[in-house]
Amino acid sequence: MKRNLVIALLLMSSLTNAQVTVGWFNYPGAVSVATDASDNIYTANWEYNPGGDITLTRWNTAGSIVWNATYDNTDNTRHEVATWVETDNQGNIIVSGTIRSGYSNPVNAASILMKYNSSGNLLWRVVYESTFDGSSTKKCLVDANNNIYVLGIGAGPNGQVTKVKKFNASGVSQWNYFDSGIGGPVNFKFTPDNAIVIIHRGITGSINGFSKIDLNGNRIWSVAGINSLSVGDAAGDAFGNTYIINGEYVVSNAGSIIKKLSASGVVIWSKTNTMSGNRIEVGTDNNPVISGYPNSGSSGSAFMKFDVNGNVLWQNLDADGTGFNLLAHAQLKLDANNAAYLAGGTMSQMAVCKVNSDGTAAWTIATSSGYPACFDFGSDNSVYVTGGTTARITQSGLISVPAVPSNLAATAAGTSQINISWIDNSSNETGFELQSSLSATTGYTTIRSLATNSTGYSNTGLSSSTTYYYRIRAVNAAGSSAWSNIANATTASSTPPASPTNLVAAVSGCNSIRLNWIDRSANETGFEIRRSNTIYGTYTTIATLPANTITYTNTNLKTGQRYYYIVRAINSVGNSAWSNKANARTTCQIVSKNREYSNSSEYVKNVRLFPNPSTSGDFNLNLPAETVFPAILKMYTSNGQLVLQKELNDYNNFISTKGLGNGMYMISLSIDGEIQQMKLQIKK
C-alpha cells in the first residue's frame, strides 16, 4: 500500500467566504473514521483475500500514520471485514466487523467487536453469537458510560432480522434486541432523549421502516411498510420526537416526504417536498435539516431546514454549484453551529459540501480519490473524510461555538429567591443565556443575559412554595453551546406547615419501636421527632427526617422500658404544633436454637416473602415471632453474584431493590448462626 504523504491544495468553490483547503490526503482509505478528544484520527480498513485482516490505523493531524494495529486471522477459509470505528471518552477505539467465509462467493459467518487502547494494543475481542451463526454488523455506537451498541443482522426468534447488541466497557454482553421484521439494518443513531432510533430497509421491494428503543433494549415504537424509492433516514430531538425522511413513491415518483413522529411514534405532521431528500439530522435548536438531490434522478447537493411545526426555514437546492454536482452521497452531519456538511463524490474524487446554519452555501471542496464512506470533525473545525483515501479538510477564519456550561445548580434562598451557579467551561463566550420554566421539559423562557465569565446569578421576585427549573448556555458570534443540565429548586413556603396527626407507636423487633403518623401538610421541609421516658417528662429531639416521611423506627432501646413520642412538621417559616403523644414498651424475645423450628423448611414456611413475583422490584419480608435478631439478609443473582446485603432488626421489613433487573434471585437469611434460603422472582 502507498504510505507516502501527499499534500494537495485544491481550488475552493466560489461559494465560500471562509478559507477552506485540503490540508492533506494519504493512503490507505477506509470504511470508517473517528476522532478522539485529543484530535487523534482512527480509520478501519480490511483486506479481501484468504485469511484477510482488519487493520486499525492511527493518524496524527499532520497526516502521518502513527501506527497500524492488525488482528492476525490465521483461518485462510475466512476473511474479516471492518464495518465501523468509534472512540470512547477514555481514548480507546472500538471496531466492529463481520467474519465472512469463502472467497469468490463469501457468506456472513459471525460478528466481531474489538477494543484497542490509544497505543494500538488489543484490549479485548468478542466473536458472537457463535463462530458461524450467519450474523453480520453494520455500525457501532459508544455512549457516555463507554457502553457499546452494535447494529447488524442476527438470528432472532423470527430468523435473521435487524439486531442491536449492547456490551459494557469490558466487552460483556448486556442484552440483544431483535426487530419485528420491518426490514434489514441501514443505520442507527443516539437521540438527545437517551434512546436509539433505527433505520430499516426491506430486504425486497422499495420499503422503509423505523423503530426506536431505549438504552435497555426495550422497544418504544416501530413503523413498518413505508413505500419509498430511496432509503430513508431518521433523527431525534431533545423532547423525544423523531423526524423521518422517505423518497416519494406516488404519482411523479419525485421529491421526498418528511414526517414528525411523537415520543410514542404517532405522526404529528407530514410535509412533501420537491427535492429528493434521503438524509436527516436534528440540530441543537431541535430543528431538522434534510439533504439529498435537487430532484429525482439529478446530481448535486440540496438542503432544506424546517422548524418544529413543519414550516420551511430555508432551502438551498444548489449548494455545491455547477462545478461539482456531487453524487453518491455518503453522510450528513451538523456541527456545533448547526452548519450542515454532506459528503459525496465526483466520480473520481471525494468531496464535502458545507451549508451555513442560515442556509447560505459556505464551500464545496474535493480531494483524491474514489468515493467517501464517512467523515468526522476535529476540535478545530477540521473535517476528516475517508473512502478511497483519508484526508483532512481545514477551515480557517471561523469562530468556534463556546463549550457548554456544566454542573448547573439551583438553591432556594427563602420564599422568593433561588441562587443559581455553574461552571464556565469556555474561553471564547461573549455571554450566557439563562432560561427558566415551571416544567422540567417544556416552557423555557430567557430570564437573563449574563456577562462573559459569569458563574452565578440570583433569581428574585419568585412565588413561594414553587419549583423552578433552569438551564443555561454560552453564546458568541458563532452561535450557542448546547444547553447545560437542568437544575431545579423549590422556594420556601410563606406559611408554617400543618401538624401531623394520628401518631401511633408499636413494638417492632427487638428493643425497637416503630412510629407512624399522617402527614397533613404540603409545604413542610421535614419532621422533628422527640422522645421522653415519662409522659410529662422532658422531650428531647432524637431525629429530623425529610419531607413527606410518615414512619420512623427508634432502635437500640432498653428492654422493658416504656417510651413516649411526639412529632411535628417544620419549614423555614416555622413549625407546626406537636402531634398527639404515643407510647410503647420495648420487648426482646430471646429464643434458644433448641426451641426454634425443628428444621429449616418449617421456618421458611412461616417467613412471608411477598409479592413474589415482584412486579415493582421491591418486596416485603415478614419474619416469625421466634426470630432471633439481628438477622442478616443477602440477595444473590442466579449466577451467585451478591447484589444486596442488609441487617434486619424487625419482624416486618420492606426491602428496596432499586437498580436490579428482572430475573430469579436467591434470598439468604442468616439467623443466630443458621442459614435459611428462598427464591424471589423480579418481573417488572
Image: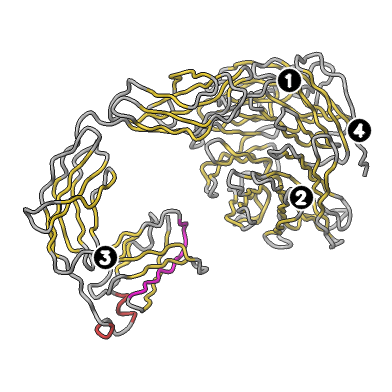
Q: Residue furthest left?
A: 536
Q: Position of residue 137 (x, y in %)?
A: 71, 49
Mark before the other along the chain sequence, 1 or 3 = 1
Q: Which residue is mark 2?
A: 119
Q: Amino acid at mark 2?
A: Ser
Answer yes or no: is residue 261 visible: no
Q: Position of residue 652 (x, y in %)?
A: 26, 64
The alpha-carbon separation of the residues under discs 2 and 4 comes to 25 Å
| On screen, residue 378 above or below 9 | below
Mark before the other along the chain sequence, 3 or 2 = 2
Q: Amino acid at mark 1?
A: Pro
Q: Specify start and end residues of the magenta stretch as a single range.
A: 660-671
Is label 1 or label 4 in front? Answer: 4
> Which image quarter holds the N terminus?
top right
Q: Nearer the viewer, residue 212 or 557?
A: 557
SS for callout 4: loop
Q: Is residue 179 magenta?
A: no
Q: Residues within 10 Å of mark 2 (few under 14, many from 20)?
A: some
The residue depicted at 38 percent of the width and 62 percent of the height is 613
| On screen, residue 170 above or below 525 | below
Q: Amino acid at mark 3?
A: Asp
> Which image quarter holds the C terminus?
bottom left
Q: Is residue 665 magenta?
A: yes
Q: Which residue is mark 4?
A: 6
Main secondary structure along the magenta-highlighted residues: strand
Q: Position of residue 330 (x, y in %)?
A: 76, 33
Q: Which residue is mark 1?
A: 294
